[in-house]
Image (tube, rainbow, N blue to C red):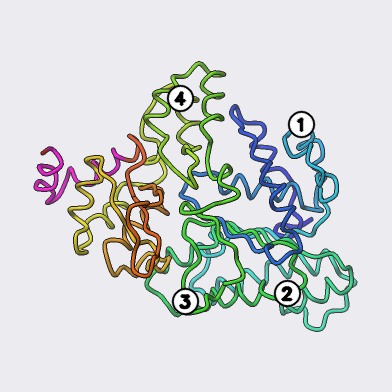
């Protein structure tokens, strides 16, 4: 057991110890179904506070050889699945929290050096008897270990897109980082599963994409794992019954996210409302409205008018297909609004009345609920936005 190789199950135990825990272990049945298949590359993108890290902790606890998690899972939904015992704590897991490496690095080269050095330290400590061709090279060392022990690795990468978000204008660094992930994972027989989480879908870098082996599950389309994207309506109803909380108020404040036709709630906000005993905007505890303000005040054709209509409760038809899955390449108002869907400031549903050029599907964007609408209002209450406020009032 190491820091990054075969971690323990303590983080998932903390989730189970909490006052409110909603069982999402059905996700494990899905990841079990894609192990060692062409579909084993899974990229899940969701907004902040939608349970990405909880899922990472859960998968780590289930697969890691560094712990015995049977007691943690025995009373949860996954325990009744046919594959539960077959895969429980059977794989070498490499878990990477990418943000921690980026925060300590001077640049991308330094980040990638630290990351590889840290993982190699765990690997060579755990497998000292392996005959390494070059134990300073991560990919070659993984191949040597797999050849020696015939046990593939599961890679669990949290906040994989932090480089794309924080170095949004540094295309050279982005490409270097994406190339590293491709070389680490693509066409490597030692990969049993690669599960990545982030806010953004995978960055488009020409055709085909650098990471085109990944199957993507996002706020646009998460089928067949949409029920694990947030809290479902039935789960929230059960919580409201258990804790004697108004379901109508919960729905008004935190419902409205639609993924593949399923109504979803922001998990962080629902839990906060129950624990604190009051409804309010809990998103701004972890991210300021300034982040939203940057985008809705961009001088893209028609964006200002579309934001006015959104705050007033309208739906806006958008073509999401040209968006480049980053935080800087915006050719139109549609690109900005598509980003806001991925950030959780808007939700989207298929537009059944209009198609784009060549039959490309369009979406209808809207503000999902009262919590997010308040963030939009906060953005326009200051600075030079009086005309926008007047338009919304009208």
Q: Which residues are magenta?
A: 373-393
- Quadrant of the rendered image containing residue 81: top right
User: Which residue is labeled 2 in the image?
Assistant: 188
Is 349 on the left-hand or right-hand side of 260? left
Q: What's the magenta bit mostly, secondary-structure-wise?
A: helix
Q: CA distance from mark 2 to mark 3?
A: 21 Å
Residue 4 or residue 158, whichever sits in front? 158
Label located before the other in sequence (4 or 3) = 3
Give the side of residue 243 with respect to residue 189, left or right: left
Which mark is on residue 276? 4
Against 157, residue 86 (above or below) is: above
Mark 2 or mark 3, earlier in chain: 2
Crowding near the residue tagged with mark 1, few <14, some 14–19, many ≥20 C-alpha atoms within 10 Å: few
Asked if residue 198 is positioned above or below residue 179 in the image, the reply reads above
* Residue that appears at 55% across and 71% down: 111
Residue 250: x and y, percent?
42, 27
Magenta stretch: residue 381 in it?
A: yes
Tell me the residue that label 3 is attached to. Answer: 205
Asked which secondary structure carries label 2, the reply is: loop
């Amino acid at each position: 057991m190491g820091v990054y190789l075969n971690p323990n199950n303590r983080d998932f135990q903390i989730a189970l110890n909490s006052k409110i825990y909603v069982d999402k272990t059905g996700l494990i049945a899905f990841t079990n179904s894609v192990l060692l298949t062409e579909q084993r590359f899974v990229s899940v993108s969701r907004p902040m506070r939608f349970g990405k890290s909880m899922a990472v902790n859960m998968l780590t606890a289930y697969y890691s050889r560094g712990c015995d998690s049977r007691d943690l899972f025995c009373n949860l939904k996954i325990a009744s699945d046919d594959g539960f015992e077959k895969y429980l704590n059977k794989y070498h897991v490499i878990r990477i929290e990418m943000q921690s490496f980026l925060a300590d690095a001077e640049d991308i080269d330094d980040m990638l050096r630290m990351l590889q050095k840290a993982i190699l330290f765990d690997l060579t400590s755990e497998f000292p008897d392996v005959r390494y061709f070059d134990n300073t090279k991560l990919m070659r060392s993984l191949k040597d270990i797999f050849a020696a022990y015939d046990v593939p690795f599961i890679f669990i990468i949290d906040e994989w897109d932090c480089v794309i978000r924080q170095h949004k204008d540094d295309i050279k660094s982005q490409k270097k980082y994406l190339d590293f992930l491709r070389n680490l994972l693509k066409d490597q027989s030692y990969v049993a599963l690669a599960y990545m989480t982030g806010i953004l879908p995978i960055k488009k870098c020409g055709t085909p994409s650098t990471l085109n082996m990944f199957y993507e599950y996002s706020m646009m389309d998460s089928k067949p794992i949409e029920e694990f994207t947030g809290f479902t309506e039935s789960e929230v109803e059960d919580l409201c019954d258990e804790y004697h909380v108004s379901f109508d108020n919960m729905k008004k404040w935190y419902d409205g996210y639609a993924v593949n036709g399923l109504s979803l709630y922001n998990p962080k906000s629902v839990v906060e409302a129950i624990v604190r005993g009051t409804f309010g905007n809990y998103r701004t505890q972890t991210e300021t409205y300034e982040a939203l303000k940057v985008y809705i005040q961009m001088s893209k054709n028609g964006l200002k008018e579309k934001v006015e209509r959104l705050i007033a409760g309208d739906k806006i038809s958008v073509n999401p297909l040209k968006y480049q899955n980053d935080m800087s390449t915006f050719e139109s108002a549609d690109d900005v609004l598509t980003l806001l869907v991925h950030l959780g400031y808007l939700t989207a549903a298929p537009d059944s009345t209009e198609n784009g050029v060549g039959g490309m599907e369009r979406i209808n964007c809207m503000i999902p609920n009262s919590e997010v609408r308040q963030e939009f209002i906060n953005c326009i209450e200051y600075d030079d936005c009086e005309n926008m406020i007047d338009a919304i009032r009208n």
